């Protein structure tokens, strides 16, 4: 067990419905600390680069258009086993499969518009954090 950092994104379906505070409360109740946070609007190029790992998947174009459609809140969450803990708080990708009490169960609209992104492993967490945040924006 170790203190980790993970990259989280509150997606356009959630920012549009004014759910940032309710979602952040879920993170904090789970012991995750929001150590960096900013509201930005992605370009199509930035969304495409961020989700490049999915570029061969049939939903890639739709996913990038959605992520660039309205502002998102990008954030760094810190805590014990933060990467896995955040995935647990988020719930399954498809809200129909998400456990009770999870963010996606409570707030997601569909498998595409599923309210939050969270890094899935230590290497992707490090890469995704540096995609959005500089060292100066990450205080200890
Ligand atoms: P997760 O966001 O749970 O890590 P993922 O990495 O497999 O899921 O997919 C990234 C995003 O792509 C996901 O949050 C929503 C979208 N997506 C995944 N599967 C999809 C599908 N079958 N139809 C539409 N969008 C999908
Ligand atoms: Mg993923």
Image (cartoon, rainbow, N blue to C red):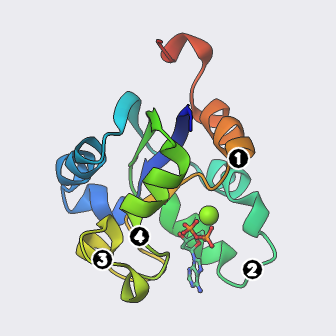
Q: Considering only order in the chain, which callout, 4 or 2, is on the residue closer to the N terminus?
A: 2
| Residue in view at x 44 percent, y 52 percent | 86
Q: Is residue 82 left or right of residue 10?
A: right
| Residue in view at x 60 percent, y 15 percent | 135
The residue carrying mark 1 is 124
**Disc 1 secondary structure class:** helix
The crowding category of the residue bearing disc 3, from other C-alpha atoms within 10 Å (few below 14, some 14 to 19, many at least 20), is many
The front one of 128 and 70 is 128
The residue carrying mark 4 is 91
Q: Is residue 52 left or right of residue 19?
A: right
The front one of 66 and 77 is 77
Q: Are marks 4 and 3 in contact (CB under 8 Å)?
A: yes
Residue 40 occupies which quadrant of the picture? top left
Q: Is the CB of mark 1 within 8 Å of ligand 2? A: yes
Q: Is residue 19 above or below residue 94?
A: above
Q: Are marks 2 and 3 in contact (CB under 8 Å)?
A: no
Q: Are marks 3 and 1 in contact (CB under 8 Å)?
A: no
Residue 102, label in figure: none
Q: Considering only order in the chain, which callout, 3 or 2, is on the residue closer to the N terminus?
A: 2
Q: Is residue 81 above or below residue 37?
A: below
The residue carrying mark 3 is 105
């Amino acid at each position: 067990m170790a203190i980790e950092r993970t990259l989280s994104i509150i997606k356009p379906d959630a920012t549009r419905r004014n759910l940032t505070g309710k979602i952040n409360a879920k993170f904090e109740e789970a012991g995750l600390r929001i150590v960096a946070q900013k509201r930005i609007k992605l370009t199509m190029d930035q969304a495409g680069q961020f989700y490049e790992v999915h570029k061969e998947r049939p939903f890639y174009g739709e996913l990038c258009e959605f992520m660039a459609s309205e502002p998102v809140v990008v954030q760094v969450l810190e805590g014990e086993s933060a990467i896995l803990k955040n995935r647990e708080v988020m719930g399954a990708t498809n809200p129909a499969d998400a456990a009770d009490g999870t963010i996606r169960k409570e707030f997601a609209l569909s498998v595409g518009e599923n309210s939050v992104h969270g890094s899935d492993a230590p290497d992707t967490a490090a890469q995704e954090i540096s995609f959005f945040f500089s060292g100066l924006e990450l205080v200890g």
